[in-house]
Image: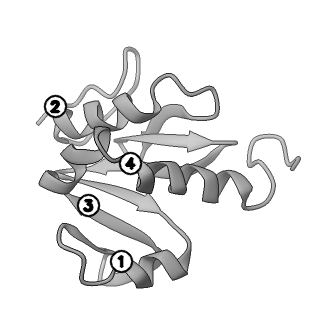
Amino acid sequence: MSRAARPGAVTSRRFDPALLAALDRVLGARADARRGVMFGYPAYYTRGRLFACVLDDQIVLKLPEATVTALAGTRGIGPFTRNGRTMRQWVTLTRPRALALARSPALVLQSLAFVRASGKSKSTGRK
């Protein structure tokens, strides 16, 4: 586990650097995705909105609720629960599933597209 998300980023949590590398391979060169930090964990944002992050030994993605429901029971993918509350538009990818993202990035790209299309930019307030 590592603490460095990007040069100069302030991270206070431990996370699996291989999982961040998997996200970087899919998103690193994209102009519509920006790496940042969320609650001390490395994360990716689009239009100022969070859509992916590395929490400890898993990747968490924001997806349409219908997709989250359709993925229920899929090996390596589960609901995202924090403080006893299940977040309805979020899923977790276990380490083996997350490491396969470079070969099969569809869920990450769907997450990016979903959040990008969902309303105004947080930073500018414009669509």
Camera-nearest label, 2 or 3: 3
- Rendered position, 106 above or below 1: below
Q: Nearer the viewer, residue 51 or 108?
A: 108
- Is mark 2 in CB contact (under 8 Å) with mark 4? no
Q: Amino acid at mark 2?
A: Ser
Q: Tag 2's secondary structure?
A: loop
**In whole angstroms, how far apart are the C-alphas of marks 2 and 1?**
29 Å
Q: How dense is the environment of label 2, judged by Cα within 10 Å: few (below 14), some, or many (20 and up)?
A: some
Counting other residues with Cα less than 10 Å from the Cα at mark 3, is it few (<14), some (14-19), or many (20 or more)? Answer: many
Q: Nearer the viewer, residue 37 or 100?
A: 100
Residue highlighted by disc 1: 71
Return the residue at label 2. 2
Q: Position of residue 60 (x, y in %)?
A: 35, 58
Compute the Cα span from label 4 to label 3.
10 Å
Question: Of callouts 4 and 3, which one flags the residue occurring earlier in the amino acid sequence?
Answer: 4
Q: Secondary structure at mark 3?
A: strand
Of the numbered discs 1 and 4, the one sitting upstream in the chain is 4
Distance (Cα) linking label 1 and label 3: 11 Å
Q: What is the CA distance from the residue labelled 2 to the residue labelled 3?
A: 18 Å
Q: Residue at x 24, y 83 (%)?
A: 73
Q: Counting other residues with Cα less than 10 Å from the Cα at mark 4, is it few (<14), some (14-19), or many (20 or more)?
A: many
- In percent of the image, x 74 and y 49: which residue is there? 122
Circle number at residue 93: 3
- Residues under labels 1 and 4: Cα distance? 18 Å
Residue hosting label 4: 53
